[in-house]
Structure formats: structure tokens, C-alpha cells
Amino acid sequence: MIIIIAEAGINHSGSLDRALKMVEAAADAGANVIKFQSFTADKLGYDEKLTAFLRGVELSKDDHHKLKLKADKCKIEFMSTPFSAEWVDFLVRLGVKRLKISSGKVKDKAFVDYARATDLPLIISNGMIDEADFLTSTHFVDTALYCVSQYPTPFNKVDFRKLSKLKELFLNAGFSDHTQGIAASVIAAASGAVVIEKHFTLDRRLAGPDQICSVEPDELKQMVAEIRQI
């Protein structure tokens, strides 16, 4: 079965209430997984402007507990992308089934080794690293996702031949979709992707850098239905 990940990311804008509603909506749409991001803005080492923005969209550990309980109740898997060893430990204690490693962290060998030591399945996408580094840095990966890090990604920039190449190299290959609409995700599923990750929001009119390439609940439901027919 193709695993469909609804990528909530930071589209909740720091609102726990909105994040909880996203869990419900993703479950109602039929997604297998709802994924968030786990970080402490002040420990990321970014500049003051970006740090201030990230402070406004971070989720506390208590928020994570509530989201995990909500996901369990809605029968959808809770998942997150940790950005530090502290958050890896926390997510393991929380009981996640797998971890997503941000492409920006792939070259951080100490962090990757730390995540790998959990023995949880690891997923990465190639978005922010060049192809050579990606192919030489992913011997530890359980699932590799083809991705174009452009928000939104023009449809003509998606090269499904690269997904086919990943399928030759990895047992599990998938697609992290930053295009607008659902067509690219459906094509990727038809091309053999075993994981589809799609940015998800309650309303694209909300503020945030990922809203423009996100699907709303009705679109997510349609995407799931079309993929399930493949």
C-alpha cells in the first residue's frame, strides 16, 4: 500500500487548536500519516529574523503530546521531523513509528548517526542537497523521496525519471510534492512511489511560506481517492 503523508509542517502557524483540526481533517481525508516539525527555534542557530519567525510557529512538547493523543484517537499515524538530538529523544519517547530527516540535516553525520541509533525507519528527501551528495549519504535510509525544493514547484520542473532512478537504488522510493494541485502526486504514485508526501493546510489563505503549495482538505481527500485507485 502507498503511504500518504499529509505534511502539516508549520502550516498551523503555532496554533495548537489549528494543528489539532489538521489532524482530524487529514484523518477524514484518508491520509495514513500527519507530519509536523519538532524544533526549538532559539537552538537552531539561524539569524535573528528567521529565529523570531520560527518562535511563532514552534510546537511545545506538551503540544506534541496532545497532537499524538489526537492522532491516536483519529486512527492516523503521528510523525514529525526533528531538528536536534533532544527532539529525536522526545519523539522516540512519544512513540513515533518513524523519523523524517530534513534534507538540510543529511550532511550532519553526528545527527544522522544519532537518529539511526534509534533503530526507527528513517525517511529523507533530496530537496536541499545535490544528487551526488544525496546518493553517497543515504546508505542509512529506509525510504528516499524525490523532491524539488522550490515553493511552489512548477509542474514542468518535476522529472519523474529521477524517481525511477531512486527506485533502482532504494527498496523504498517516494515523492515529496511541492507542486500546486494533486496531479504530480498521482503521477508519482502511478510511477511506483511507495510514499507520497504532500503539504497540507486547512486554508491556503492563511499566512506561511508553505501554504501556496499545500492542498486543502477536499483536495487531499480527492488525492487520496485517486491514489487508492492505482
Image (tube, rainbow, N blue to C red):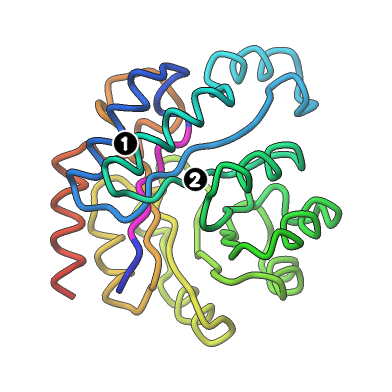
Choose between 107 and 72: the one closer to the eye: 72
User: Which sits earlier in the primary sequence, circle 2 or circle 1?
Assistant: 1
Of all residues, the one furthest to the right in this rendering is 110
Quarter of the image for residue 85 reads top right
Which labelled disc corresponds to residue 86?
none
Task: Tell me where residue 139 appears, x and y as whole percent.
Answer: 72, 75
35 to 67, vertically: above or below: below
Q: Tell me which residue sits at (33%, 58%) in the image.
A: 4
Choose between 33 and 183: the one closer to the eye: 33
Task: Tell me where residue 37 appears, x and y as whole percent.
Answer: 54, 36
Task: Tell me where residue 20 appears, x and y as whole percent.
Answer: 33, 27
Specify the principal SS of the magenta part.
strand
Which labelled disc corresponds to residue 150?
2
Question: Which residue type does callout 2 highlight?
Answer: Gln
Choose between 219 and 113: the one closer to the eye: 113
Separation of residues labelled 2 and 1 (CA atoms):
25 Å
Instruction: State yes or no: residue 48 in magenta.
Output: no
Choose between 223 and 26: the one closer to the eye: 26
Judging from the image, what secondary structure is the residue with disc 2 in?
A: loop
Q: Tell me which residue sits at (43%, 45%) in the image.
A: 78
Q: Tell me which residue sits at (26%, 42%) in the image.
A: 74
Q: Tell me which residue sits at (32%, 49%) in the image.
A: 76
Question: Which residue type does callout 1 highlight?
Answer: Val
Q: For mark 1, what is the residue?
A: 23
Q: Is residue 44 left or right of residue 125?
A: right
Q: How many marks?
A: 2
Of all residues, the one furthest to the bottom in this rendering is 168
Instruction: State yes or no: residue 6 in magenta.
Output: yes
For the C terminus, the image quarter is: bottom left
Task: Find the magenta span and give its range.
Answer: 4-9
